Amino acid sequence: MHAASSAVPPANVHGLRWLAGFHRDPLACLDTWAAGGLAEIPLVHLAAVQVSATIGIRALRRLDPIGPVLHSVGRGTVEFLVAPTTMPADRPGVRVLTQGSLLCPPPGRAVERRRAPKWVVPPDGVGRLMDVRRVLDAVTAEYGYFATLPPDDGAPAPSTAVGAWSTTAAAAFVTAGRRAAGRAS
């Protein structure tokens, strides 16, 4: 009988190796995860569509997610991992990240750190990524839903200007979502 190990369950090994393969030093990345840390995955051979967590989680309901989706709790965002793209973020509240890096926990395991990123859909190692156009369409549909709600307590309505996003607009979306959830109950 084999002794229990604190290693990642075998079902997640493929996802670990796949994601670590994007790191400059895959072995260092795996060591960071084994030590319970977060690894910076460079956005060189992958990109990410970043939206507010409220919109991102709702957009997931419109998608059949076949690729990794990260919830960056501390930033209040959701990142859909997509193939590298030159597609501009021509929609309000959307950033298409093609440079920099994402701070990622190991696939299939939580990092014991307050407000640490968490996988909503962890990498499975197959190499599938979300389709950028489908993600953008789902996100746009969610923004359309929120745009139909009147602003709360005199707060400005969310901007529909291309690329517009601000803390005020984010607060209006969150407030509108809470109000809509309250009406539904």
Image: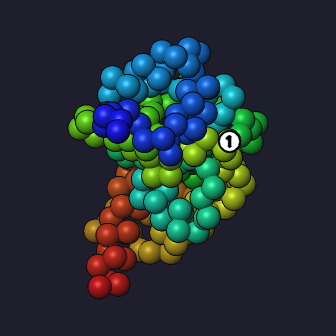
Give the quadrant of the C terminus: bottom left
Q: How many labels does the image show?
A: 1
Left or right, residue 44 beside residue 167: right
Query: Dot 1: within a 10 Å radius of its alpha carbon, few (fewer than 14), some, or many (20 or more) residues?
Result: some
Determine the residue positioned at 47% across, 23% down. Answer: 30
Q: Residue furthest right?
A: 86
Determine the residue positioned at 64% across, 36% down. Answer: 47
The part of the image, by quadrant, that contains residue 37 is top left
Task: Give the answer, above or below, for where 65 lies relative to 104.
Answer: below
Q: Position of residue 45 (x, y in %)?
A: 69, 28
Left or right, residue 144 beside residue 84: left
Determine the residue positioned at 56% across, 14% down. Answer: 25
Determine the residue positioned at 25% across, 34% down. Answer: 113
Task: Give the answer, above or below, for where 147 lies relative to 30.
Answer: below
Residue 34 visible in this rendered orientation of the protein = yes
Give the quadrant of the N terminus: top left
The part of the image, by quadrant, that contains residue 82 is top right
Residue labelled with disc 1: 127
Q: Position of residue 86 (x, y in %)?
A: 76, 36
Q: What residue type is labelled 1?
A: Gly
Q: Position of residue 24 (x, y in %)?
A: 59, 15
